[in-house]
Amino acid sequence: MALIINDRIWGGIVMTAEHTLPDILWMLICAALVMLMQGGFCCLETGMARSKNSINVAIKNIIDFCIAAAVFWVLGFGLMFGASSSGFFGTTHFLLGRESGPWLLGFFLFQMVFCGTATTIISGAVAERMRFRSYLVISFLVSGIIYPIFGHWVWAGAEQGIVAGWLGQLGFVDFAGSTVVHSVGGWVALAAVLILGPRHGRFADKELPMHGHNLPMAALGLMLLWFGWFGFNGGSTLGVSDSIPLILLNTNLAAAFGGIASLAIVWNVERRPDVAPTINGCVAGLVAITASCHIVEPAAAVVIGTVGGVVCTLASYLLIRLRIDDAIGAFPAHTCAGVWGTLAVAVFGDLHAFAEGTTRWQQFLIQSE
């Protein structure tokens, strides 16, 4: 059912038959699911932190979403989805109001919760070391500038069904944000932990583990993230589509096999199962499949998720070897798995999803940009 026929105007914008009430409703439901991921991150990160720092981690998660919601409305959405200036940043759509119409407002809400996700990745990595005031500055910069501008390069014009960003025009494919959301947040997290250094006593005389105080809560956080990810990937169709069941199946399979792969490695190395690496393996599987969940077969999703879990676990061991203290493994799970997932688009994606005449090797080079 069309929301408004072509000769009727809502808030000054002519709505076409392409913008239907079911499409907007699907986006809004998925936006709510993605917002639930904020609670998942809060549970996971506070559970992985030591008890004396859990309150500080919790308020960072709360304020992340507050800042993302405010700054993305004032500045970020316009930079990300406004009229493009040479494919680098947007120049319109700041301070959206009622006159923007139901479609654009719904699209804004869906994209705003993505912004919150990218920002909150950082809070777990820097847990137990950063002053709250300093963290607010990082949250503002990521929500208002870093994430929106990079997002413009890839997703600009998505609300109109066009490609306006310079990276998107090259043919870069990132369906729901393996790079745009997760790698961006993870790279900022790595930069922050390199500047801050390790927690006191983490690498004093030997590799001293600092276990989270509530791993059952962290496990609950994972399940909330997993559930919310169905909205993260499924909602990126921006409407009701027959591709949604495949997207959700691929998402679920990648998460499951990512967890299994991480558990297998850790069990073999440590001679015992360990819940924290298994949690991160599941997250890594979710991150890895996010770029290509709409254009790969379920068997490929299994491979992508499995490799994502392996990459995450090996990267975690490498960080310890390099004495880099990422408190919850944000960089391995989000950046490393995100990079793999972005490259996997070229390896496993349907060739029909690439620009006409593009080979897998050519697409691989584009994905590597």
Image (tube, helix red, strand yellow):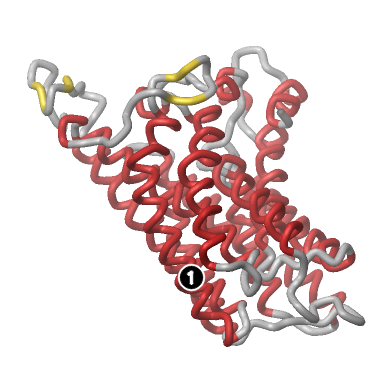
Crowd around label 1: few <14 · some 14–19 · many ≥20 (10 Å) = many
Location of residue 140 with respect to 352 vertically, above or below = below
Q: Position of residue 366 (x, y in %)?
A: 70, 25
Location of residue 224 with respect to 166 vertically, above or below = below
Question: Disc 1 residue type?
Answer: Cys
**Residue situated in front as seen by the camera: 330 or 229:** 330
In which image quadrant can residue 272 be found? bottom right
Query: In the figure, is residue 169 to the left or right of 111?
Result: right
In which image quadrant can residue 24 be found? top left
Q: Secondary structure at mark 1?
A: helix
Query: In the figure, is residue 41 to the left or right of 190?
Result: left
**Residue situated in front as seen by the camera: 205 or 226:** 205
In which image quadrant can residue 320 be found? bottom right
Residue in view at x 65 percent, y 71 percent: 129
Q: Which residue is mark 1?
A: 42
Q: Which quarter of the figure is the N terminus placed in?
A: top left
**Residue situated in front as seen by the camera: 294 or 60:** 60
Q: Position of residue 166 (x, y in %)?
A: 57, 20
Residue in view at x 54 percent, y 23 percent: 88
Q: Position of residue 183 (x, y in %)?
A: 64, 46
Residue in view at x 85 percent, y 67 percent: 323
**Residue situated in front as seen by the camera: 365 or 17:** 365
Query: In the figure, is residue 116 to the left or right of 126?
Result: left
Residue sticking out furthest to the right: 205
Q: Which quarter of the figure is the C terminus placed in?
A: top right
Query: In the figure, is residue 80 to the left or right of 301?
Result: left
Tally of numbered discs: 1
Residue in view at x 50 percent, y 63 percent: 226
Q: Position of residue 51 (x, y in %)?
A: 58, 87
